[in-house]
Amino acid sequence: MELIYWSMLLLGGIFSSWTRLVAAEEEVLMNTKTETSDLKWTIFSQDKSESQWEEVSGLDEENNSVRTYQICQTESLSSQWLRSGFIQRRGASQVYVEMRFTMMECSSRTSHHRSCKETFNLYYYQADSNEATASYPPWMENPYTKVDTVAADFLLRKGGERKSNVKTLRLGPLTKRGFYLAFQSQGACMALLSVRVFFKKCPPLISALSSFPETVPRYLVQEAQGSCVEHAAQQGPRPRPPKLFCGEDGQWVGQPTTSCACLPGFEPVEGQTRCTACPVGQFKSGTEGQCRSCPGSSQATIRGASTCACRSGFLRAETDPADMPCTQPPSAPRRIKHYRNGTTHTLKWNEPLDNGGRTDLSYSVRCSVCRSAKGSCLPCGDSVSYQPAQDGLLDQWVEVRGLLPHTTYIFTIQALNGVSSRSAKDPASDSINFTTNHEEPSLRSVTWKSESTESSLTLHWSVPAQPHYNILQYELRYCEKERRSESQCFYTESNRSQAVLTDLRRATQYEVQVRARTLAGYSSFSPAAVFRTLPDGHDSASQFLVPGILIAVGMLLLVIFVFVAAYCIRRHSRVKDPDLSDKSSQYFSGQGVKVYIDPFTYEDPNEAVREFAKEIDVSFVKIEEVIGAGEFGEVCRGRLKIPGKKENYVAIKTLKGGYTDKQRRDFLSEASIMGQFQHPNIIHLEGIITASCPVMILTEFMENGALDSFLRLNDSQFTPIQLVGMLRGIASGMKYLAEMSYVHRDLAARNILINSNLVCKVSDFGLSRFLQENSSDPTYTSSLGGKIPIRWTAPEAIAFRKFTSASDVWSYGIVMWEVMSFGERPYWD
């Protein structure tokens, strides 16, 4: 009787209100409340005499029939199991189980004993198919996975309020196709009113012009990839799909990461959820901002316009932005005036009344020469020159030279702006004509004679006699025949009818013109004559004579030097201190290959300087600015212009005042070392200046300076391929030094220079050996009576001062560290 009573009491909780958890979006896998037939779940009892789970029917608050399970154990602790049917997980990695149940208070039961409990256990079992039977899987905690022990918040008692409990537990992670739920009672008196199994998912979302699909979270946060909404596209050089994170609670987390923007002609509306076309009369040229009204003299006749078309008679230049009004070509220049000064004619004019609505006004000059009374005129030839230019004039004047005497000319001044080239009409213009006088000299026919070398032309010319005046001077104009512009032409003057043109390119054709200057001014230039310089190896026999003699004498001296050097080496080796065996001083290898000669093997070090370094006249050098400081003095940038050669930039190392003889020898020893090397990855010695103060060493100028500071300044700006290219250049230079039997001893990124083409060159030769204990450079550390760069030096060199090409290889490895880390200090701090 008691069992029936408590059954009615437990089921009475079903009529209390049913509430649903409010979540972002839920997909239900199972809900017993919606089932219309028997559930027929599997029941198992360890004690057949004890009360078991029983399926019963009831009515919810809406009088709908629902199926429930109840149990009320009285005297034992035996396990009573209830297992659901197979539930498909539908891609969810974790699910939620919502249980509505009632639980009887143990103290309210008349048969209360110590086996009574007010809790039950929830388990689940995963499977790829509906494989469970009445005996499989075994009814025990393993293979079932326990979720939790469920306790009631509200207990039923006689005469008390009838209130049900709602508990929601999470299962997971789920990896198989489906699972079973199992409920275990061990002494409880309860009713399982409903069970709802569901998982949470983030609903479809449109935000920031990006659309994200429905997403099922598989982790704490699940990344979801989206796409741009219609009429929008991703921006930037490396566009990536929009992304947003879906939380495990089915809520979208944070803001989208997206570069989506409305296409030209469309603007964002409704809170950045869609793009709509610009209305008629408006436009949007880019992806940013909103639609705007068309600028002046333009119109948009359709929806979604990215630009506004110019109205009839108006134009837009290619470089004009879309929001700039359409404009017109300018009107004609006004009031052209002509002025004459000797043979120079100046034209001046006023600007047009209408500039077309633009500020980029310019002018062009067109010249016609009329040589007959019939009025037939032809364009002027190349003999007429214009200053400052013939086209693209920004001011309202031009100087004209080279006009023929007693000749009629017509000059037309055209006004142009940025849209003139797009107009179908000729530029608006105004003209003026005048006739030159009879006193200007004329060179219509010139006879030329020439002699050519690889880099020069020697020219002689004769001109017709001038009956009315004497020629005071000649001016030559010469240019490469294949020149791209008039700015590549050069001028030279001569008091006689001959001239030598130097610094020319070999095997190149040059056009040469000449004009005469008299008391009446300059004549026009003569017609162009073409001359060609010789290619390599085509100088006359006399040009080979002096170099041939020099080469023969040089070979003879070289042979004598080899014998003397070999004799000196033998004598020196007999008394050589074994402690100095690391010195990299050799003359020639057994195969006769050129090797490095240590300048300190000379009795007089100045002799090595004279042999390997070229003395340069100080007048050829111009110092421009100080760019740093070195061990012996300042480092400057300057220009070197040797007669007959092209001017170029050089780096200039100076020896500060108050130096001793030893400091001077040590300073110049680097030049005598550097002068022996000829390699594209070794810094090139231009020469030295010792005949005046201060003493200077001139090397090629490297625009980007030291490699370590350059890399730190451009951190992460180069690709690994570019960095490896730098390392290859350094390796090539060091291989050359090793083949020359030279040991650098101080290879580091600070001693590598880099030019504007990212070519690396090894520098700073011989300086490391002079660093003494009193040196203030923190890079160098005391060791065995001197200072060495400890972070870059091989262990055997640190321990025994044994420097070889192998120790340079160790230093090269540290340089690789510096380059690939963009100038990072080796071994950090």
Image (tube, rainbow, N blue to C red):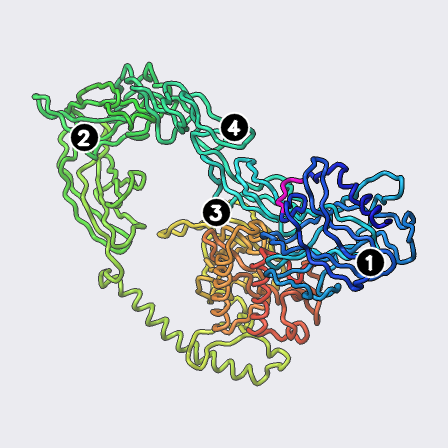
SS for tag 1? loop
Tell me where the magenta segment starts and ends, as one range.
Answer: 23-28
Q: Nearer the viewer's eye, disc 1 or disc 4?
A: 1
Q: Earlier in the sequence, mark 3 or mark 2?
A: 2
Whole-number angstrom distance, CA of label 1 to CA of label 2:
117 Å
Residue 26 belongs to magenta span: yes
- Residue 622: image tag: 3
Q: Would you name the residue on which mark 2 appears?
A: 380
Kind of residue indicated by mark 3: Lys
Whole-number angstrom distance, CA of label 3 to CA of label 1:
104 Å
Q: Please tell me how crowded label 3 is: few (under 14), some (14-19), or many (20+) other residues with Cα within 10 Å.
A: some
Q: Residue at x 83, y 45 (%)?
A: 153
Q: Please indicate whether residue 335 sits to the left or right of residue 777 in the image.
A: left
Q: Earlier in the sequence, mark 2 or mark 4?
A: 4
Kind of residue indicated by mark 1: Gln
Q: Nearer the viewer's eye, disc 2 or disc 4?
A: 4
Residue with the most extreme bottom position: 574
